[in-house]
Amino acid sequence: MKGYFRTVAIVFIIYFLAFAVFAAVNLKGSGGMTVSDETVVVMNDIAHDASENWNSIENLRQKNYGVPFVILDSNNGIVLDCREGSSGSRDTVTIEKAVKNRYPYVYVTDGGRIVGTVILIDDGAGIVRGQKTVLTAAFGICGLAFLAGALIYGYYIKKNITEPFKKMEQFAGRVAEGRLDEPLLMDRNNMFGSFSESFDIMREELAASRKREIALQAKEKELVASLSHDLKTPITGIKLTTELMKAKLAKENDHGDMVSKIDNIYMKADEIDVLVTDLFTSTLDDLGEFKVNCTEEKSSVLNDIIRKHDDKELAAVSELPQVIIRVDVRRMSQVIGNIINNSYKYADTRIDISYRLTDGFLEMKIADHGPGVPSDEIELITNKFFRGRAQTEGGFEGSGLGLYIAKMLMEKMEGGLIASSEGRGLIVTLLIPLA
């Protein structure tokens, strides 16, 4: 629309310049009758003849001078009127009017005394001048009418076409952004009324469809959470049964193949337990139902958690500062368990665990000596369901939830998790808030 008004402005400027040139040319020299050499000669002939025939001035009618003229006496009275047309239609001529209209005139003398005045009448020039003035005014009025019409038409286009299209464009942008609760507001007399109404009906249908989709997703997540919770009971039963069987066999001094098979059953059940726990935690987080309950604990609880999850007893733990930390012990156990289990699954090397105090945190660094993580993947390994090339190509089983859950739990406990890989090995640093 800006382009339209710019075009109108350019056209009007061109028109204004053309009008100025037209007016200058058309009105130039229209102030009075043009006096040529022939006119001067004729006017002098009339004055000479009038001087010789002053007492019989009517004799001049017999001569054809080729121009209309009037002869006045010294009292400004008409003594001879040689203009065309009836006497009733002729205007009164005076010296003052001749001067005002720039009619050429010359005095009639008799013996050196002025007895009258010869005035040449420019009857046609006045009409022409009037016509030129009218034409110029009409040209200017047409230009103003064109400008007014163009502006009114532009306003109509802007109000009834451009603005409705702009509103529909903005509406389409809101729909693309997912803002389906904002209706398409249009004027009652809009020419695209039915079209815009169809757009708004589409928005309402999309909004309803999205609500149904969100409700369905919530039900699916609730189902996953319910199933995950229900699976915990038989898994716990399997682990308890294998522990009892292993204890009974140990009591009977049977350390044969049966004990290793029971250990294998327990290990697989524990892996399933970890996976189900992670899935349950992730689903609760998606539903907004996951919570942590932080309490003040001695830092020694961390070593207890490490011993609980260090099945292979390959963790080398440095001296632990004796401080009070604020954590959810159950969730902290889940965090450390996920990290140690990942290390044993993918690296299967010694694990070095060290501590140091930083500003408001106890920093716990867990490092293995495996192949590490490529630099282009290190920022992604804490993303939900992410699994690196080494894990997928090596055939390792996993869901890609372990480190994601660990980071999420640390953040809910107002701490943090940072993953890095320097040379060989993966280093996971936990920032545990101090009480």
Image (tube, rainbow, N blue to C red):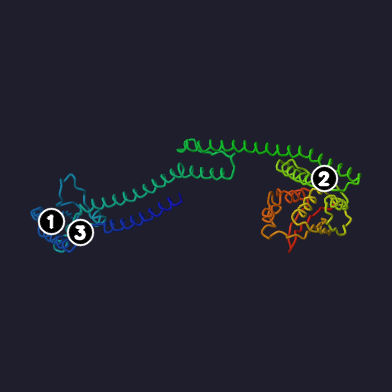
Q: Quadrant of residue 53?
A: bottom left
Local SS, label 2: helix
* C-alpha span from label 1 to label 2: 143 Å
Residue kind at label 3, given as amino acid type: Tyr
User: Is disc 3 surrounded by few (<14), some (14 to 19) or many (20+) residues within 10 Å?
Assistant: many
Local SS, label 3: strand
**Label ID, residue 435:** none
- Please name the residue that numbered disc 2 is placed on: 262
Q: Residue at x 91, y 46 (%)?
A: 253
Residue kind at label 1, given as amino acid type: Gly
Residue kind at label 2, given as amino acid type: Ile
**Label ID, residue 105:** 3
- Locate residue 168, reporting x and y percent: 51, 42
Q: Quadrant of residue 73?
A: bottom left
**Label ID, residue 66:** 1
User: Is disc 2 surrounded by few (<14), some (14 to 19) or many (20+) residues within 10 Å?
Assistant: some
Q: Residue at x 91, y 44 (%)?
A: 252
Q: Residue at x 28, y 56 (%)?
A: 26
Q: Nearer the viewer, residue 319 or 156?
A: 319
Q: Nearer the viewer, residue 378 or 307?
A: 307
- Locate residue 187, reporting x and y percent: 50, 37
